[in-house]
Amino acid sequence: MDIEKLEKIAESEPDFRMKQVKKAVFHDLIADWIEATTLPKSLRERLEKEAPLEFSAEVFPSKDGRTVKARIRLEDGLLVETVLMKHTDKRNTICVSSQVGCLLGCEFCKTGRGGFKRNLTAMEIVEQVLFFARHLKDKDEKITNVVFMGMGEPFLNWENLKRAIEILNDDNCFGIGARKISVSTSGITEGIEKLAREFPQVNLAISLHAPDEKLRGKLMPVNKKYPLEKVLRAVDEYIKNTNRKVMFEYVMIKDVNDSEEQAKELVKLLRRPLYMINLIAYNPTGRFKASPPEKIKKFKAILEKAGIFTTQRYRFGNDIEAACGQLASQK
Ligand code: SAH
Ligand code: SF4
């Protein structure tokens, strides 16, 4: 599907048409132009020919039915993966990708190991949400949250990220509130600044994964250009300007970053107002092992005892390689 063509086609039509087209696609979630009964037949036929609404995608449901991964084929044949997570409290979260591959090559992440292909356009980002919105419509359900935690570094694709957030937000399109949208970054400070300026209500998550520069540098090459210290300064500035909470993501890797000493170092670093920690079970990608549950428990207890709000992420979709860090652009 190529929604960009829509805008071109709508240009030659009266102004209100684009609104009708958007409503049909993003709000009514039509899968065929025939359903867009507000549009004249000639326009529907032209749209059907020039901007068909079908997706080329494969779908992989997890055994427990709570996670579905979609592998969408883009116009140029590249593949992008998107994940739907169904929470027990009726929330339906879509984890979207912002790039095909990633330039940053974190040691624990499969996306990073496959190399970088290209940025996604705003529409290609939005299409991932559209895909699952239609999927849920059949079950009378809706998307409630969108997280930019799929493939790629969102802040290295700022213009398209920005446009995509605007479309997700737009009441004529999806109408998803900014507070229901989260962006995760490996610590690109310019992006953190721009997010505070342009979308202060969108949630920010920071991939931390280590309590010191040396280890973070080993796990995340991006730490050279954006060291811990610089990232935390940007976060403080972000909080000063937005007064919003910030979530620090920390993947628990066995015997690498999960010791009691490291938990105490983390306390020193992150015991500050509006800082929260989300401990993530490491999803196997070949290189490391996951911390055992009892070690995660101990680690969490140290953080909590120090008064840091700490959560543990439910592991979605491990069996279909749809968990954090397991998305890739190749089969
Ligand atoms: N590039 C951005 C957003 C995508 S990654 C970022 O790094 O923040 C989304 C989250 O999954 C990040 O916190 C990332 O560190 C984490 N992740 C990567 N590989 C993982 C793995 N193997 N197991 C668990 N989480 C992983
Ligand atoms: Fe890129 Fe994020 Fe994976 Fe690191 S964790 S390689 S920044 S997608």
Image (cartoon, helix red, strand yellow):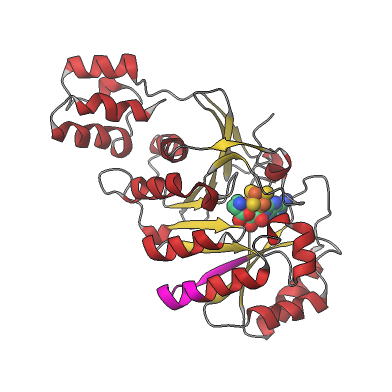
Residue drawn 49% across the image and 75% down it: 237
**Does residue 245 show up magenta in the picture?**
yes
Residue farthest to the front, as pictured: 225
Is residue 134 found left or right of 280 in the rendered image? left
Count of numbered circles in the view: 0
Q: Residue at x 58, y 73 (%)?
A: 276
Task: In this rendered view, identify the residue nearer to me: 272 or 318.
Answer: 272
Residue 161 percent location from the top left of the image:
45, 48
Magenta span: 237-248
Which residue sits furthest right?
A: 255
Q: Is residue 35 magenta?
A: no
- Left or right of 278? Residue 27 is left
Residue 202: image location, x then y, percent: 42, 61
Is residue 86 among the parts visible in the rendering? no
Q: Position of residue 138 (x, y in %)?
A: 40, 34
Q: Looking at the figure, which quarter contains the C terminus?
A: top right
Q: Nearer the viewer, residue 66 or 168?
A: 168
- Residue drawn where x is 86% and y is 64% of the image: 255
Q: Determine whether, in the image, residue 322 is placed left or right of residue 259.
A: left
Q: Is residue 44 visible?
A: yes
In the figure, is residue 293 to the left or right of 137?
right
Quadrant in the picture for residue 201: bottom left
Quarter-wise, where is residue 289 in the image? bottom right
Give the image location of residue 90, x and y in percent: 46, 54
Point out the image quarter for the N terminus: top left
